[in-house]
Amino acid sequence: MSKALAEARDSLRTAGVADPAGDVRRLARWAEGDAARFEAAIAMRAARRPVSHITGMRAFWKHDFIVTPDVLDPRPETELLVELGLKEPFERVLDLGTGSGCILISLLAERPGTQGVGTDISERAVLIAGANAERAGVADRIVLPLSDWWQDVGGRYDLIVSNPPYIARAEMADLQPEVRRFEPRTALTDEGDGLGAYRAIAARLCDHLTPRGRVLLEIGATQAAAVADLLAAAGLADVAVHPDLDCRDRVVSARSPA
Ligand SMILES: C[S@@+](CC[C@H](N)C(=O)[O-])C[C@H]1O[C@@H](n2cnc3c(N)ncnc32)[C@H](O)[C@@H]1O
């Protein structure tokens, strides 16, 4: 390894970055041999700015997504929602809290002819989702309204997905600096016990799912039982919990009654 790469790795390790060697590789690839660009990137990363905020992009499922400080940096574990969504046929899909649009756009790109609605409370997020939809070639099949959960959502969908803000307010201080200082707070927490968004979503699911339509909700690792109870109490059937590759509960699914 060259001296510059070794020094960069040491500087990230000293700053407390979790994967210094991996981040040095990613940033070196992105800098394309421009030493000044690489040095500036390492300085930003040492200040705990996320790699995606430095490069402006994040790979998710089969596409590269534009990422800015206005949207959640798409997480690899969220790909489980896409994987589960693709296990069944769907024609109309709704994504509540779409952010960069990574889930919805990935689903639409895999299923030609399907239509999608992606809502968010953040105007800047829906603009970024729109740019990502253009890049992925699905812009003509997607609508991105601003909406506070169900407020401006109409119609019924055979698939509803969401990765809502699920961190409790009391847990915000424990987050890594990359998340706490650089990601949008509205994407992270409901400012309550972490279940507020699930309560709001569960309350109207039966009004917006087609008969036997499916809902898939990403959850925090300790929230499976609480979210499963909320869905069952809202009249959903076939409630199930799905672990991620690290064996942590990651998604709760259910169906609307026939
Ligand atoms: C955890 S992020 C998920 C973003 C994206 N779906 C992903 O998986 O990367 C949650 C998203 O919900 C949005 N959100 C927060 N409160 C909302 C609300 N009341 N109504 C609609 N969207 C909301 C945030 O702006 C954010 O984009």
Image (tube, grey):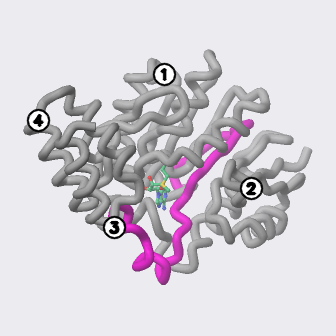
**Dot 3 beta carbon under 8 Å from ligand 1:** no
> What SS does tag 2 mark?
strand
Q: Residue at x 54, y 57 (%)?
A: 149
Quadrant the N terminus occupies: top left
- Kindly tell me whether residue 228 is visible in this rendering: yes
Q: Is residue 78 magenta?
A: no
Splitting the image into 4 quarters, where does residue 41 fall? top left
- Which kind of residue does numbered mark 4 sit on? Ala
Q: Is residue 218 left or right of residue 26?
A: right
Mark 4: few/some/many CA within 10 Å (<14, 14-19, 20+): few
Tell which circle, 4 or 2, labels the residue nearer the N-terminal end: 4
Please state the extent of the stretch shown in magenta in the rendering.
Answer: 151-179
Q: Residue at x 18, y 42 (%)?
A: 3
Query: Can you tell which of label 4 and label 2 is closer to the viewer?
Result: 4
Tell which circle, 1 or 2, labels the residue nearer the N-terminal end: 1
Tell which circle, 3 or 4, labels the residue nearer the N-terminal end: 4
Tell which circle, 1 or 3, labels the residue nearer the N-terminal end: 1
Mark 3 touches mark 2? (CB < 8 Å): no
Q: Residue at x 62, y 64 (%)?
A: 220
Q: Which residue has dot 4 on it?
A: 35
Q: Which residue has dot 1 on it?
A: 138
Q: Which residue occupies the foreground of this view, 54 or 24?
A: 24
- Which kind of residue does numbered mark 1 sit on? Val
Mark 3: few/some/many CA within 10 Å (<14, 14-19, 20+): some
Whole-angstrom CA distance, mark 4 to mark 2, is 46 Å
Q: Which residue has dot 3 on it?
A: 177
> What SS does tag 3 mark?
helix
**Dot 4 beta carbon under 8 Å from ligand 1:** no
Mark 1 touches mark 3? (CB < 8 Å): no
